[in-house]
Amino acid sequence: MLITLPISELIPGMFVDSVSKQFEGIDSIKIKTRGLVRDKSIIKRLVSEGVQELLIDFTQSNVGVPSKYQEKPKATPVIKPTSKTQTGKIKKIITLEQEFAKASTSYEQHNRKLQGLYGDITSGLKMNISLLDDIAKDIVASVFRNYNAMTILTRIKDKHMYNWQHMINCAIFVTVFAKYLGYKESVVHELAMGALLHDLGQAKLPQGIFSKSEDVNKLEMQAIKKHVAQSLGLVKGEKGITPLMLDMIVNHHERLDGSGYPRGIEGEKLSRPARIMAIVDVYDAMTSDRPHQIGDEPINALRHLLSNNLLFDNELVQRFIKCLGVYPVGTIVKLTNERLALVTEGNHKNPIQPKVKVFYNAKHNHHVTSKDIDLNTSEQGLKILASIKPLDYQLNLARLLKEHLVV
C-alpha cells in the first residue's frame, strides 16, 4: 500500500519509496533516497534537505498505516449480486454461507494432500512443490472471496493431524492477516506459500518426537530446531521459491530480543513477513490440540502474544487482534442471556462485539432455532461472558458448522 505523507508524519519503521515533494533552495540537494527509516537522525536529515512529502510503501514498512489513512472496514454484504463491472460481467458477492460449503470441502482435501506429501517426505521421496502452490492459490482465492469461511475451519482441531493441519492453518491466518494489512494478492500468495513451507522440514525428523504425550526434553528440542535447516534443504533448487518465502522459513522462530533460533538475530534485522509468521505460528500452535496438549482458547493465546512485546512485534500483534477479533470466527461463546452462539463475523472497530449465530440454551441444555445477532447493535444489550470449548457442552464443532453454515 503506497501512501503520500507529509514529512511531519514520518516515523522510524516506515519505508520510503520516493520523495514526492522537496523545497528546492539554492543549496539544496535533490533527494532520491529509497529505503527503511531506521532512526530519527534520518528524518532530521530529510527535513534539513527541504523534503516536504514522501511516498511510503507500507507493505515493506515495520509500522502500520496511520489510522487516519486506513480504509474503513466494510460490513459483510447481504446476498445480492452487485452491479456490472467495467467488463460488463456480473460480479457476485459471496456470503459466508455460500463460501463455507466450498471452503470446507477444500479444507478437507488440502489436509489429505498435505498428509500424503508429509508422508512422502518422511519416506525420502521428492517434495511436490506444485501441490503446495495449488493449495496456496486455493486458500488465497477463498479468503479474497470471503475471509471468514476458511478462518472458521481453523477452529476444528485434531491432535493426530497437527503437523500438516498447522501448515494449512498458518497459511489461512497469514492470508487473512496480509489481506487485512493491505498486501497485494500476488504478495499474499507468496506469504501463504511461506506459511505452508515453514515447518515442512519436520517431516525429515524422527516422528516419535511429535507423537509424544508429554513435553519434549532438551535433547529432543535440539533435534526439533533442526527442522529449519531441513525445510531449507527441501526447497533448495525448487522453481518458484522466492526470497520472501525463504525469509519466512529461516526466521519464523527468531524473536525481537535475539532469544530465538537458529541464528539469534534481533530487532530491525527481522523483516515484517518474518514477524508476521512468528505471530501466526505461535497463535496456531497455542490454540491447537496436540498429542501433549489441549489447545488453549484464542483469547489466551492473544494475551500471550500481547504480553510478550520483547519477543513479538507489538504493533503487528495489536493489528492481528483487530483482524481476528478477541473472539475469532468459529469460536463458541456464552452470552449474558445464557445462550451459546457461534461467532460468524468479527468487528474490526470493536473486537469484543462480533456478529454471532445463537444456537443453544446453556441453562436448559438444548438446541434452539438459530438466530443471527450483531452484538454491536443488539437492542437487548447482549454481551459475551466468555468463550467455551465445544466439549464442555458435548458439542461437535465440525457437525455444528455444517448444520448452521452450509446452505
Image (cartoon, helix red, strand yellow):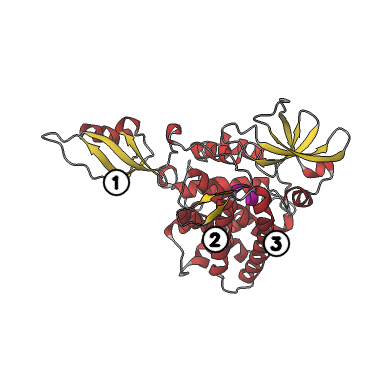
- Say if residue 253 shows up in the picture: no
Question: Decide: marks 2, 3 in contact (CB < 8 A)?
Answer: no
Query: Where is residue 4 shown, x and y percent of the image?
Result: 34, 39
Observer-nearest of 258 and 284: 284
Q: Earlier in the sequence, mark 1 or mark 2?
A: 1
The residue tagged with tag 2: helix, strand or loop? Answer: helix
Q: Earlier in the sequence, mark 2 or mark 3?
A: 2
Residue placed under numbered mark 3 in the picture: 208
Q: Is residue 136 above or below residue 46?
A: below
Residue placed under numbered mark 2 in the picture: 137
Whole-angstrom CA distance, mark 1 to mark 3, is 49 Å
Seen at 75% across and 52% down, the residue is 402
- Say if residue 239 shows up in the picture: yes
Query: Where is residue 116 shown, x and y percent of the image?
Result: 66, 68
Q: Residues within 10 Å of mark 2 (few under 14, many from 20)?
A: some
Q: Which residues are magenta?
A: 147-151
Q: Residues within 10 Å of mark 3 (few under 14, many from 20)?
A: few
Q: Is residue 91 above or below residue 239?
A: above
Q: Nearer the viewer, mark 1 or mark 3?
A: 1
Q: Is residue 2 above or below residue 120?
A: above
Instruction: Name the kind of residue labelled 2 in the image.
Output: Lys
Residue placed under numbered mark 1 in the picture: 34
